[in-house]
């Protein structure tokens, strides 16, 4: 897998995921890149800008490209079994845009989620996702499934509360108990959750709006829901 951009490559090096690094010239953060690469025994080679342009299909690579060690595939059942208690997960229904997916991963990593579940087909290019996530892709455990609705059934059977986020949700997000094992389910902007996916959710909640726009960017919605879950869980810890 190829990733590019200074921050994604730095984070991947810190996470021990990089096989090789290619650069076109020195830049301010090159010292840190070289230090981390040398510590990990990762070779750095010079390459023409045209080569990096070709490798990244014309994306803004900032003069640095890295090849990652492929992560060990993980199943949904493994993710559930290895999650902390109470588990905190994100399930993505039809989010294909690399910018949106990357931003969701950034929010998820900041909130300390156990993993993100997405559909196998129509997946966003990893390099673009890594850059949009500002390096969070190197840390977030990703599980790819064939069928999201079936994945929700698996989560429910394992005792994980599935909470869909929609503009017309029956309850407010802050009024449901998020201290139990929880998976937030998010749909694409515009279309939202597909009917069958929505029907498989245990609850569908909304985020109240005060302005004229009736929907949020999916990564913003994910962040609000995830950090409300953290707030509720920290409140439980503080009350003990």
Image: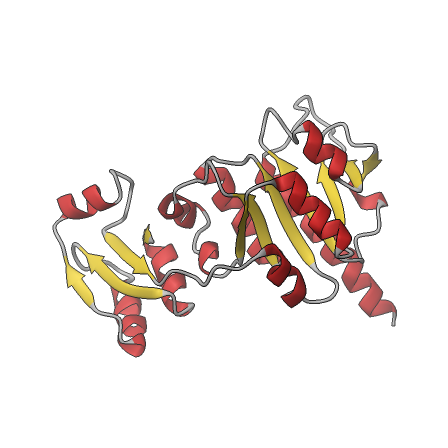
Question: Number of labelled discs?
Answer: 0
Most extreme residue toward the top is 212
Horizontal and vertical percent for residue 215?
65, 28
Give the left or right position of residue 207, taking residue 186 as reference.
Answer: right
Q: Is residue 89 visible?
A: yes
Quadrant assignment, res 135: bottom left
Give the left or right position of residue 171, taking residue 186 as reference.
Answer: right
Q: Nearer the viewer, residue 44 or 153?
A: 153
Q: Is residue 207 visible?
A: no
Q: What residue do we see at 41% from left, 62% from top?
A: 11
Horizontal and vertical percent for residue 237?
81, 68
Horizontal and vertical percent for residue 206?
76, 35
Q: How is the image coloured?
A: secondary structure
Q: What residue do we see at 65% from left, 23% from top?
A: 213
Most extreme residue toward the right is 240
Most extreme residue toward the bottom is 39
Is 19 drawn above or below residue 106 in the view shown? below
Give the left or right position of residue 62, taking residue 83 as reference.
Answer: left
Give the left or right position of residue 107, taking residue 201 as reference.
Answer: left
Quarter of the picture containing the C terminus is bottom right
Q: What residue do we see at 31% from left, 68% from top?
A: 32
Q: Nearer the viewer, residue 210 or 105?
A: 105
Q: What residue do we see at 20% from left, 42% from top?
A: 53
Quadrant assignment, res 67: bottom left
Quadrant assignment, res 111: bottom right
Q: Nearer the viewer, residue 182 or 210?
A: 182
Q: Nearer the viewer, residue 141 or 237?
A: 141
Horizontal and vertical percent for residue 178?
79, 53
């Amino acid at each position: 897998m190829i990733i590019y951009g200074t921050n994604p490559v730095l984070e991947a090096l810190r996470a021990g995921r990089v096989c090789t690094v290619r650069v076109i010239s020195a830049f301010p953060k090159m010292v840190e890149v070289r230090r981390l690469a040398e510590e990990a025994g990762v070779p750095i080679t010079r390459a023409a800008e045209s080569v990096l342009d070709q490798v990244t299909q014309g994306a803004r690579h900032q003069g640095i490209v890295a090849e990652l060690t492929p992560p060990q595939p993980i199943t949904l059942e493994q993710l559930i079994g290895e999650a902390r208690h109470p588990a905190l997960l994100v399930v993505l229904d039809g989010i294909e845009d690399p910018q949106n997916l990357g931003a969701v991963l950034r929010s998820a990593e900041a909130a300390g989620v156990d993993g993100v579940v997405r559909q196998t087909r129509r997946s966003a290019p990893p390099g673009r996702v890594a850059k949009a996530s500002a390096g969070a892709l190197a840390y977030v455990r990703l599980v790819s499934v064939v069928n999201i609705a079936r994945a929700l059934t698996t989560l429910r059977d394992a005792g994980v509360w599935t909470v869909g986020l929609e503009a017309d949700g029956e309850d407010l997000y802050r009024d449901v108990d998020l201290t139990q094992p929880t998976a937030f389910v998010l749909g694409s902007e515009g279309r939202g959750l597909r009917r069958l996916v929505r029907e498989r959710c245990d609850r569908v909640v909304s985020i109240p709006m005060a302005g004229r726009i009736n929907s949020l960017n999916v990564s913003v919605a994910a962040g609000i829901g995830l950090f409300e879950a953290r707030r509720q869980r920290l409140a439980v810890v503080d009350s003990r």
